[in-house]
Image (cartoon, rainbow, N blue to C red):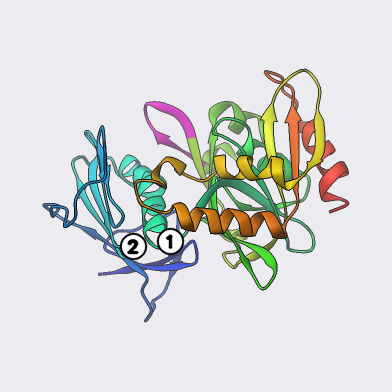
Amino acid sequence: MYHFFKVFGLICRSEINLSALIKLSESESIDFEVKLIQSLPEFQFPVLVSEEGCRYNETEFFLEIEGVAKYLVRNGKEILIKPTSEDWNSILLFFYSNCLGALLFQRDLIPFHVSGVLDPDGKVWLFAAPSQTGKSSTALKLKEKGFEIFTDDTALIYVREGKCWSIPSYPMIRVWKNTLDKQSVFQPEEATQIRSEIDKYGIFFHEHFQDIPREVKGIIFLEEEGQEIQIRKIGVMEALPLLGNNIYRGYWVEGMKKQIIQFEVLTSIIRYTNFWKAIRPKNQDSFNSFTDEIIDQILAGG
């Protein structure tokens, strides 16, 4: 029995249930497949990058998480999984985070490390920042103030017909326990611990998820620094390296030979959207006032 899903605008046929994704009844058009397998095949082409538990080239990506699973992503068309445990929360965690990212690169699609919300006009504001800087916390606080969550952690960004667009990942938001305890959008029983050894939780929001491309109104780079909230619009020369630093798994670009694709995507985005830097005080619980300032100084005026 096959399951059908949609993620990053792609249609997937899977032998396993991928609960975080948007489920479809069926589809005649398939972009990639997910299969369980007893033994992973060998690489067909030379390995270009070899790291602990991971090796890859332009069209093949292997990942081993000890005591969890082995994965092989090939040609942007299939993800093979060999479980080495029965911990399906962990098996799917690395599928969502690493395997889908590798598949996008193989399909010449560049994912970005962003969260985002929809404004009342249905356009997207994206928040770019390294992990644990507050992307998800900012999105949750904005949802408390009336903005719907568009995506969490990753999205595609591209330019079409002179406008910047974004495609969301899937309707699951991941938050640390301290963020979960401070938000009022979701009930605690809606959250599931992602892995027993880390204090991070996943929450589904399928009911309010909109999986169609949306026009990007602006990209806001989040930082923690100093003792005061600072918000300012920035130009393309400052925004370009910040945007490049927020490519999801950007260290794969060279080994997968996506430098030209990366350059084309970055330079096109820079031409067709606006950028801000929003800085909140370091080591302070300031998200409420921080998001108020983001609304007043950015979102309200566009």
Residue 296, horizontal then vertical, whole percent: 88, 43
- First in residue order: circle 1 vs circle 2: 2
Q: In which quadrant of the rendered image does the N terminus lie?
A: bottom left
Residue at the bottom extreme of this rendering: 28
- Res 220 visible: no
Q: Secondary structure at mark 1?
A: loop
Considering only vertical position in the picture, is 94 above or below 171? Answer: above
Image point (55%, 59%), residue name: 264
Q: Nearer the viewer, mark 1 or mark 2?
A: 1
255 vs 178, nearest the viewer: 255
Residue 42, horizontal then vertical, whole percent: 13, 52
Q: In which quadrant of the rendered image does the C terminus lie?
A: bottom right
Locate residue 267: give its quadrant. Answer: bottom right
Which region of the structure is painted magenta? 191-200
Locate residue 148: give its quadrant. Answer: bottom right
Q: How many C-alpha atoms fall within 10 Å of the one at disc 1: few (<14), some, or many (≥20)?
A: some
Residue named by callout 2: 76
Residue named by callout 1: 108
166 vs 25, nearest the viewer: 166
Image point (26%, 63%), residue name: 15
Under mark 2, the amino acid is Gly
Image point (78%, 18%), residue name: 227
Image point (19%, 55%), residue name: 45
